[in-house]
């Protein structure tokens, strides 16, 4: 991997989850991001659960993984529901699971409840898929962000992630740095929500991000300006 800002398009592409999570996404739009992901060799596509099997068929043999979301976008479903969603998604071909933290429990100070929730999904996917936990940083205080990040690491998550893209705010350099400090070097940090160009992506990486979630993946690797998630 290149140092500083000297990332090649291929190196940047390998850090991007090429994302389409809007409610009105069509089958053709999902297939299009899969074709783009193959062309640019993105790390994964990120799609809603109902599209996982279609994406899996399209991406077979390409080397591109498939991320899907569970408990999305509020994080307020039960642990059993999140675990079941994850299991079904893996059966359909998902290789990475982005679950939403139980934000209400976090805001209530129920740290044990938050940890049990993550542990339940981590146990369901262990050995089968990478687990990322979306904190929805725009709804948390800095103290809560740090605590949630540490809890996710302890509970067996492989990544902590900033945002759903549907809540308040998105990724910031400050939040990425805070989350990286909280988890140390051993797990990933994913910046998602509002990363639409190369410069912003590089700032996130410099702050400690190891993955970028964006619908603007092509703009990021080609130096253009994207829109949306």
Image (tube, helix red, strand yellow):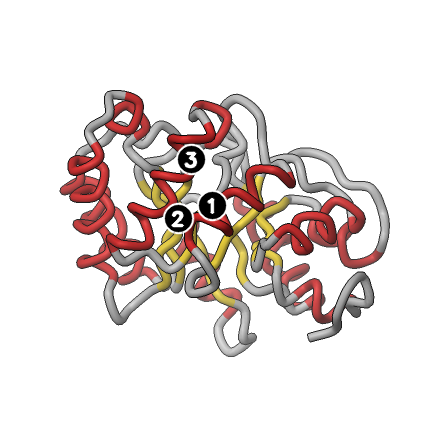
Residue 11 lies in quadrant: bottom right
Count of marks overlaid on the render:
3
Camera-near label (1 vs 3) is 3
Characterize the local packing of mark 2: few (<14), some (14-19) or many (20 or more) Cα atoms within 10 angstroms.
many
> Which quarter shows the N terminus?
bottom right
Task: Inspect this view and state whether residue 49 appears.
Answer: no
Q: Which mark is residue 228?
A: none
SS at circle 2:
strand
Disc 3: which residue: 145
Q: CA distance from mark 1 to mark 3?
A: 10 Å
Task: Say whether marks 1 and 2 touch (CB < 8 Å).
Answer: yes
Q: Name the element at disc 1.
A: strand
Q: 10 Å neighbourhood of mark 1: few (<14), some, or many (≥20)?
A: many
Q: Quadrant of the C terminus?
A: top right
- Taking the spot 45% from the left edge, 58% from the top edge, the residue there is 184
* Image x and y of residue 174, in percent: 61, 38
168 is higher (above) or lower (below) than 86: above
Q: Name the residue that disc number 2 marks.
A: 98
Residue depicted at x 54% and y 69%: 64
* Residue 24 position in % (x across, y down): 53, 31
Instruction: Please name the residue that numbered disc 1 is placed on.
Output: 161
């Amino acid at each position: 991997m290149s140092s500083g800002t000297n990332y090649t398009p291929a190196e940047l592409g390998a850090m991007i989850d090429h994302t389409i999570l809007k409610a009105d996404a069509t089958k053709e739009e999902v297939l299009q991001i899969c074709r783009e992901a193959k062309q640019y060799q993105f790390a994964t596509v990120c799609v809603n659960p109902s599209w996982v099997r279609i994406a899996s068929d399209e991406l077979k043999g390409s080397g591109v993984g498939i991320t899907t979301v569970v408990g999305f976008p509020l994080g307020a479903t039960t642990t059993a529901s999140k675990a079941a969603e994850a299991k079904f998604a893996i059966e359909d071909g998902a290789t990475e699971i982005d679950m939403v933290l139980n934000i209400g429990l976090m805001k209530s100070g129920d740290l044990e409840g938050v940890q049990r929730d993550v542990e339940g999904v981590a146990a369901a996917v262990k050995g089968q898929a990478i687990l990322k936990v979306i904190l929805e940083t725009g709804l948390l205080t800095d103290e809560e962000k740090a605590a949630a990040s540490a809890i996710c690491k302890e509970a067996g998550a492989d990544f902590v992630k900033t945002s759903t893209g549907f809540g308040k705010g998105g990724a910031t350099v400050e939040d990425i740095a805070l989350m990286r400090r909280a988890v140390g070097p051993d797990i990933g940090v994913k910046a998602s929500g509002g990363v639409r160009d190369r410069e912003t992506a590089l700032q996130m990486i410099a702050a400690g991000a190891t993955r970028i979630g964006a619908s603007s993946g092509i703009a990021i690797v080609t130096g253009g300006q994207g829109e949306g998630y």
